[in-house]
Image: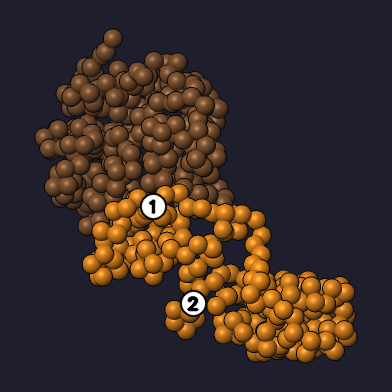
Amino acid sequence: MSMSNLQKVFASGAFAVTGELGPPKSAERKKIEHHAHLLKGCVDAVNLTDNQTAIVRTSSIACGRILIEEGLDPVIQITCRDRNRIAIQSDVLGAVALGMKNVLCLQGDHANFGNEPSAKNVNDLDSMNLIQSLRRMRDEQLFIGGEKLEAPIDLFIGAVENPFADPFEYRAYRLAKKVEAGADFIQTQAIFDMDRFELWMEKVRQLGIHKKIPIMAGVIPIKSLGAARYMKNNVSGMIVPDAIIDRIKAAENKKEEGVKLCVEMIEHLKTVEGVAGVHIMAVAWEEIVPEITARAGLLPRPKFD
Amino acid sequence: MIVAERKPLTEIIKAVAPFEKVLVLGCGECVTVCMAGGDKEVKETAAAMAIARKKAGKELAVKTQTVERQCEFEYLEAARKLVEEADVVVSLACGVGIQTMNLHYAEVQTLPGVNTTFMGLPLQQGVWVENCLGCGNCVLEDTVGICPIARCSKSMLNGPCGGSQDGKCEVSKETECGWHLIVERLIKFDKLSALSEVKPPKDWATSHSGGPRKMVREDVKL
């Protein structure tokens, strides 16, 4: 089976770079293409969020197909919030049939965050079950219920972990559990508290997890003081230290300071043992990714024949 | 216990508007303890109904009674006389009691006077928390007595999710993260390693997901 571009980058040992694209609250293909073109050449693969923060948007798999047609490698996010095991397995088969391979397994923000707070939260599976079920579909050709797939499928299974969530002492163990469940690569929640991230990585290294699978460190460029404050106060599972808020507040050119901070973080993350790449989440600010990747010395991206 | 909350009086008053003779029927079990449908609430509700009707310039005959347990047929016989005199019954029992009434007295309509909220416990006076979803396959042994199905907003078997912060759930700062409590309690009993095993997808067929449930025990049937 052929490797996805992201897999190839990991296999080559290069420091990987992924981006993120938030599908629109519409069916405008042009918007998706536009954002895809902004990221093209700067990243090895692009995450497509699955109704992020429980807000209805174009499906991640539909957007994934558009990205393939535009020459990018999609990472399909799948949450457990909206679909039961029948729908998830069906959608994964559909994604594979449409040429997708990278799937990122998430639990999903609770529906009360979004624009359909009355929705029933499904959560038939949890994110750990999702990882383990996809691994079984791929490696054993079995559906969750035990029936055999009619033909093998290939998947590159991603998982997430949040070093900034609690209880902190359990977070590295939980990562180990995700690897045991079948994750092939990891993406972390966005890092602003570098001390806490390093503490977590120390534990991750003690457990030897970084030698088993690549870990991508998440970063978000801060666009404005409002955005920084919003993340600090309103985004679940995120820590934005006051020092960062103060730094943006003091800066004359807030956007430039946000970019500078992001570039500094990436430069630092490159030196952290066990960090195999960065995942840049510049949702609604995709046009900044070329500048960040250039200034952080991440360009050109590796090409494979 | 089954926890319930009385429906807004305006809603109850509106529901009985077409009727002349109303019986407000309480229950002496859970709803009495959670102060939603015991004798006190029954009398309050009846008085409010009568006053509202009087204000509208009409008459309403309201009777009240509280049976010992509204969710079993045998206790409902005590209310037969008043039920048969009434045009309608407003039950302040939980959803189970209301349905038992409708089954037992099929000729009379019994309307709900409470919203049945959950199975839980009174944490302190005036505060109740949900702690069992009746999923039909108890996992409390694995999670040191804290239910991940009921206490985690996402019913995760392998929690906590990334939204748990400072012991609170992402859904609300008022909600404790069930998985945070589980991890803390496992640490206390030196059993954190129990979490290293990946729990497989849950069999929800034993829950309501498998359809309305019925339990038959041949050993105790008469």
Q: Do dots 1 and 2 share one subunit?
A: yes
User: Where residue A57 appears, x then y in whole percent?
Assistant: 51, 35
Distance of label 1 from label 2 (alpha carbons)? 27 Å
Nearer to me, B165 or B195? B195
Residue indicated by mark 1: B199
Q: Residue at x 22, y 57 (%)?
A: A169
Q: What is the display colour for chain B? A: orange
Specify the subunit that label 2 lies on.
Answer: B
Q: Residue at x 50, y 49 (%)?
A: A124
Residue indicated by mark 2: B121
Query: Is A278 positioned to the left or the right of B49 in the image?
Result: left
Tag 2: residue type? Leu
Q: Who comes first in sequence, dot 1 or dot 2?
A: 2
Rendering quarter of residue B12: bottom right
User: Where residue A69 appears, x then y in whole percent?
Assistant: 45, 15
Image quarter hosting the N terminus of chain B: bottom right
In this orientation, does residue A234 appear? no
Query: Is B64 positioned to the left or the right of A275 in the image?
Result: right
What is the residue that sits farthest to the front in this orientation? B219
